[in-house]
Every structure is written in structure tokens, then in C-alpha cells.
Image: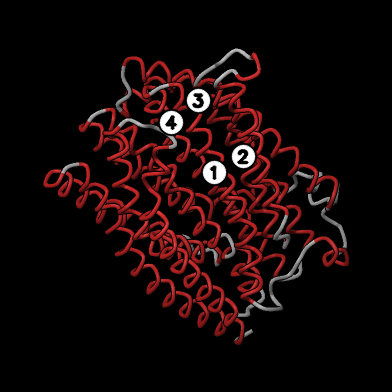
Amino acid sequence: MASTSESAGNTKKDTGSYTDGSIRRHVIKLSGVMVIGFFAMTLGNLVEIFYVGQVGKFELAAYAFVFPVAMSLNALTRGIGIGGATLIAQRIGRGITPAATLAASHCFLLTMIFTLSLAILGQFASTGLFMLLGARDEVLSLVVSYASIWFIGFPLMGIAMVSNGVIRAFGDASFPGYITVIGPLVQVLLGPLLILGWFGMTPLGLDGAAWTFVFSTSCQVLLAAWWFLGKHHRLAASIAGFIKTSRTILKVGVPAAATNCLQPLSMVIVIWLLADFGTTVVAAFGVAARIEAVAGMVVVGISAAVVPLVGQNWGARKFPRVHETLRNCYLASHIWGILAAAIMASFAPFFVNLVSDDPSLVSAAVLYLYIIPLSIGFMGMVIIATSAFNAIRIPGPALILSASRLMLVFVPLAMLLGTLVGYQGVYIAIALSHVLVGLISWIWCDRRLHTEESKLTASEGSL
């Protein structure tokens, strides 16, 4: 493994730089690889929910209860990854690769401590948690059993997820896609064996889906370990300065984690609101949200270009390239938003019927897929702007934007429209909150970047 005294002369062969060359080409490469990876991941989830749908409606409802909890824990862990990736990207932009290598090592140690602690807590708290979310009777039993297995794989997933951001920050745009794709591939291949009992195996039902998750994340971690330990030697065998590095990571990581958690928290609120309309509507939301996630993950993939590109160029003080990055990402997000809305308008019934043929479930799920994709481009603007704030290590505005979207826009609208219109009103509130906060995010991010540039230029000019 590399030591912290590793010479900077090895930088060019082991890492890549985004401070030169075509911004559009960098955006396309970074986004393209991650879009493919995220698409595979969400497609894998869709295939899995198809398998679970063959088992029964109660299993689908239990699966829906797990979704926001898993997203919340992922969001907390991703915050650490964002804090580490922004630090690494800026150090790479400044040409101090040994310091970036040490930061990566400390980021992984911090991730392991955090995820193992949550996994242990989750084993003891899952029953009370899912009861609080509204799970009852058979659904509660199913979801608790699933969660007890899922928490075994959670630390592995955390390491794999953080690895993707760290590798991108080092300048490798391609390899994170391989890590992302291998998980869904294992998921799709093992799913029918463990869930449905193909080829003579004992069918495990929903528990089979949980074990599939454990095996798929294990494969992702092994692939990431090969990149860091075998291919590029990008881990330092040192814990010197771990506390100091952790504080630097968490300065961005904690607000980023809070920001990330607001999205799954909004899903918890959605499920809580929809629970009053019955198990069928909750199950329909679980199916539709997974399908819509395929489209939504594309804009998440586009936003994945922001932290490494903005981080490195901000560190190198190449501000025009920062703005060009954001313009390209905003444009790509809206182009995809239009295409996604058209696709869902044409094929939503077909997608939902692949999972369930229950008429009430299909009707509720299809309506969701007609409404929400109309706002995907604006949702992308929020994600891109918050990623930019994190990339320059000023996470406060990102947290404010996400909290405002949830508490000041979505919740009031959802409660009002849910009362007036029914569960359809909750769907409309989701779309409207994306549009409004997307526009605000774009304006605020642009203005704040110019302000910070002026401060940096003035302070460095006075030295």
C-alpha cells in the first residue's frame, strides 16, 4: 500500500485530471458511465421487485416499507462519501496526491465505523421502527425478517458506495460503473434462485431478496478493493491524523448526509400519508417509485459529474470551467426529463403490469408514473446545485434547499392536496415541489458561486 510520503510524480499514471480538456467530454464520460451503472442498479431493483411480486401483495407492501429506511441509511453513508470525495478532488486539483490518498484511507475507516454501528443498532430497533412507519401484522413480520438480513450487508454496501465517489474524485471516470453494474448482475442472477426457488433450491421469498443483497454488495466491495489495493495502490497504511481528517470530512459530510436524508424522509412522509388510503395504494407507490427511480437515477448519474469536475477545477481556481460544468449538467438533466416523461406517458401501464396485475394497484401506480416524470428535469437541478455546493465545501445552502423543499413546500402541499383530491394530490405535490425548488436552486447556486469566487480572488490576490 502507498504511504503518505509517496511522491507526486506518480500522480499522472494513477489518477486523472479534469482541470484540462473539454468539459462537455468530461461530463459525458463521467455521467455516461454512472448513468449506465445507476440504470443497471435500478433495473436490477425492478427485476427484484418483479420476483417479489410473484410471491405476493404482502411481500410487496413489506418491500415498500424497507425502501425509505434503506434510502435513509444510504443517504447518511453517502454523506461521508461526499465529504471525502470533495476533499480528495480539491487536493488532486492542487496536485497533492499523497494527501488525497491519506484522506481516502481515513474516509473508508470512518465509513466502516459508522456503518457497523448502524447495522448493530438496526438489528435491535427494526421492529419498533417499522411499527412507527405503519407496518402491521403479517407485513410487519415480513419486513422485520427482511431487515435482519439486510443489515448484514449494509456495511458492505456503504464501503462500495463510498468507493465510487472516491474513485471518481481521483480521476477515474470508468471504474465506478463496473462496481455499480456488478451488484445488479448478481442480484438478477441470484434473485430467482433464492426468492422463487428455481433449479430445485428452497424458495426463501422476501428473505431471499435480502440474501441476494448481501451477496451482491460483497461482490462490489471485492471489485473496489482490487482498484484500491491492486490496480492503483490508493490506500495509505496509516491512521496518523485520522481525527483531524475525519473532522474535515464531516464538515461537509454531516450537512450532506442531512441533505441526503431529507429525500428518503419525504418518502417516509409519503408512505405515512398514503397508508390512510390502504395497503394497495402503499404497494402501488412502492412499485411506481422503483420504476420512476430508473428515470430519476439518470439525473443522479448526471449530477455525479459535478463533485469531481467542480471540486478539481475549484481547487485549481479555474472558475469558468466550474460554470461550464453546471450549464452542461442542467441542460442534460432537462433533456432527459423530457424524454423520461414521454417514455412513461407511453409505457407506464406496461411497466406496472410486469410487476402486478391487480387492477387497483396498477391504476394507482400508473397515475404516479404519469405525474412525477414531468418534474424530473427540475429534480435534477436541485441535485446538481446541491452537489455543486458540496463540491466547493459549502454545504449549508444545500441543506437549506432540501429542508425547505420538504417542510415548506412538499409537506403543506401534500397535506392540502391529499385532503382535497386524495392520494393523487400527494403525487401532484411531489412534482410541484420539484419544479419550484429546482428553479430556486439554480438561481441561488449561480449567485453563491460568483460570491465565493470573488472572495477567493481577493484573498489570494492580497497574499
Residue 184's mark? 2
**In this view, the mark in front (3 or 4):** 4
Q: Name the residue located 61 percent from the left edge and 20 percent from the top edge.
A: 198
Kindly check if marks 2 and 1 are in contact, taking CB atoms under 8 A apart as contact: yes
Q: Determine which residue is flagged by label 4.
A: 66
Q: Please provide percent x and percent y for residue 222.
A: 75, 37
Which corner quadrant holds the C terminus? bottom right
Q: Name the side, left or right, on which 338 lies relative to 163.
A: left
Q: Amino acid at mark 4?
A: Val
For mark 2, does the 10 Å Cα neighbourhood hold few (<14), some (14 to 19), or many (20 or more) residues? many
Q: Please provide percent x and percent y for residue 229.
A: 82, 45
Kindly check if marks 2 and 4 are in contact, taking CB atoms under 8 A apart as contact: no
For mark 4, does the 10 Å Cα neighbourhood hold few (<14), some (14 to 19), or many (20 or more) residues? some
Q: Please provide percent x and percent y for residue 363.
A: 28, 40
Q: Amino acid at mark 3?
A: Leu
**Closer to the N terminus: mark 2 or mark 1?**
1
Residue 121's mark? 3
Q: Determine which residue is flagged by label 1.
A: 43
Q: Secondary structure at mark 4?
A: helix
Q: Name the side, left or right, on which 333 lies relative to 249.
A: left
Q: Amino acid at mark 2?
A: Pro
Q: CA distance from mark 3 to mark 1?
A: 30 Å
Q: Name the side, left or right, on which 304 lies relative to 291.
A: right
**Closer to the N terminus: mark 2 or mark 4?**
4
